[in-house]
């Protein structure tokens, strides 16, 4: 039986409760010192969130006939791992909000100002604490993967997943570096395939990892030993790229209160997205000059950001990215053909539907 949007969200919430309980166990909390660093590590983790990546991991485990409970530590690892990438990404992008609250570096900058630090000292303190928290979360995620052994997962599978986590980090940092470098390149110097590759590295491969981990634990086999694991990984990677395309769309058309982060920040930062590239290619010379002048310009005003947003819509950049995301999701769904029918497979299909049409 198909799973509707509400049932999909409810399934995520049910698993979130177990995830949050595991992450907040005393054995972990007591190991993070000093107290300020502990507070930083848990700041994002205990904020309201969708928990999509650990959810996909657990659904993937069930979809191959596995026991979700055995994959819970690994699901927590993926959530913690994702969190460190957000913490560092917020520093790089100079973002002020995450999930409706101050970003970690801003949170600790505010703490320092309240304690009498100067503005410069407070900014340094906030940035430094956020970097340290992200580094610690990265290490903790590796520990949580290793602790899957305690749930009966074979050491061969756990070692394979840890090796894949290392390669994941390399790929993800490559994607982040490309994002930074692309923002300094002229729009007309970029190709669409370069941007899509960057999206795959920044977002797609972490979803792929979640799918591979869940299926590997569910079967207690490595990816080289079973083609179902590869199928779920490919499905998740493609949905991840579509997820990021939709994220870029919401960065133009979304509701700031619902998203919990500023709308238009990608324009201020000069992000090179499929939306921007397509609109630039369709624009007349005057509007191209305007985009070249103001995209990524620190002096861009709110009024100019609104004008650029309208350009990206009127020159069909948003519509083009939406059609591309839909096409990629359809291709992703085809990857699930070898997976036996089950409620877990239906949950994965519901995620694909969510990716294609999400508003938050």
Image (tube, rainbow, N blue to C red):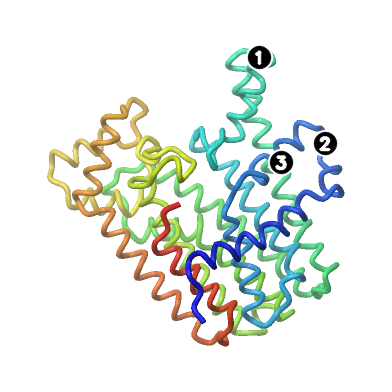
Residue 21 placed where, x, y %?
A: 76, 54
Q: Residues within 10 Å of mark 3 (few under 14, many from 20)?
A: many
Q: Nearer the viewer, residue 68 or 338?
A: 68
- One can see residue 209 in this view: no
Q: CA distance from mark 3 to mark 1?
A: 22 Å
**Identity of the residue drawn at 85% across and 47% down:** 26
**Identity of the residue drawn at 57% across and 45% down:** 86
CB under 8 Å between discs 1 and 2: no
Q: Is residue 100 above or below residue 280?
A: above
Residue carrying label 3: 41
Residue carrying label 1: 117
Q: Secondary structure at mark 2?
A: loop
In the picture, measured across the screen, residue 335 lies left or right of residue 135, that is: left
Q: Secondary structure at mark 1?
A: loop
Q: Nearer the viewer, residue 27 or 159?
A: 27
Q: Which mark is residue 254?
A: none
Residue 85 placed where, x, y %?
A: 59, 48
Question: How many numbered tags mark residues here?
Answer: 3
Q: Is residue 161 above or below residue 96?
A: below
Residue 192 placed where, x, y %?
A: 32, 58
Q: Which mark is residue 33?
A: 2
Q: CA distance from mark 1 to mark 2?
A: 22 Å
CB under 8 Å between discs 2 and 3: no
Q: Residues within 10 Å of mark 2 (few under 14, many from 20)?
A: few
Residue 23 placed where, x, y %?
A: 75, 52
**Identity of the residue drawn at 59% across and 23% down:** 123
Q: Residues within 10 Å of mark 1 (few under 14, many from 20)?
A: some
Kindly indicate the quadrant of the structure image that contains residue 144: bottom right
């Amino acid at each position: 039986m198909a799973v509707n949007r509400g049932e999909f969200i409810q399934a995520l919430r049910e698993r979130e409760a177990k995830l949050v309980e595991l992450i907040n166990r005393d054995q972990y909390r007591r190991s993070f010192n000093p107290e300020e660093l502990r507070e930083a590590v848990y700041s994002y983790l205990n904020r309201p969130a969708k928990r999509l990546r650990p959810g996909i991991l657990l659904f993937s485990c069930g979809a191959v006939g596995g026991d979700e409970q055995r994959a819970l530590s690994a699901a927590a690892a993926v959530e913690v791992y994702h969190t460190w990438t957000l913490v560092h990404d917020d520093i790089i992008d100079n973002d002020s909000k995450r999930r409706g609250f101050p970003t970690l570096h801003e949170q600790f900058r505010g703490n320092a100002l309240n304690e009498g630090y100067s503005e410069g000292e407070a900014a340094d303190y906030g940035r430094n604490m956020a970097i340290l928290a992200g580094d610690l979360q990265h290490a903790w995620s590796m520990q949580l993967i290793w602790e899957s052994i305690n749930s009966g997962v074979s050491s061969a599978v756990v070692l394979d997943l840890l090796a894949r986590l290392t390669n994941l980090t390399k790929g993800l940092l490559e994607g982040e570096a490309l994002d930074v470098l692309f923002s300094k390149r002229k729009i007309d110097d970029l190709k669409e395939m370069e941007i899509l590759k960057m999206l795959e590295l920044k977002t797609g491969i972490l979803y792929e990892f979640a799918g591979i981990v869940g299926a590997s634990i569910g079967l207690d086999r490595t990816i080289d030993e079973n083609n179902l694991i590869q199928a779920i990984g490919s499905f998740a990677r493609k949905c991840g790229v579509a997820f990021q395309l939709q994220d870029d769309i919401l960065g133009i058309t979304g509701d700031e209160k619902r998203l919990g982060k500023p709308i238009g920040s990608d324009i201020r930062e000069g992000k090179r997205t499929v939306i921007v590239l397509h609109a630039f290619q369709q624009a007349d010379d005057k509007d191209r000059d305007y985009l070249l002048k103001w995209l990524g310009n620190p002096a861009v005003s709110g009024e100019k950001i609104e004008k650029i947003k309208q350009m990206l819509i009127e020159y069909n950049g948003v519509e083009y990215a939406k059609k591309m995301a839909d096409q990629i999701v359809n291709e992703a769904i085809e990857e699930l053909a070898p997976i036996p029918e089950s409620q877990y497979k239906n949950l994965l299909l519901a995620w694909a539907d969510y990716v294609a049409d999400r508003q938050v």
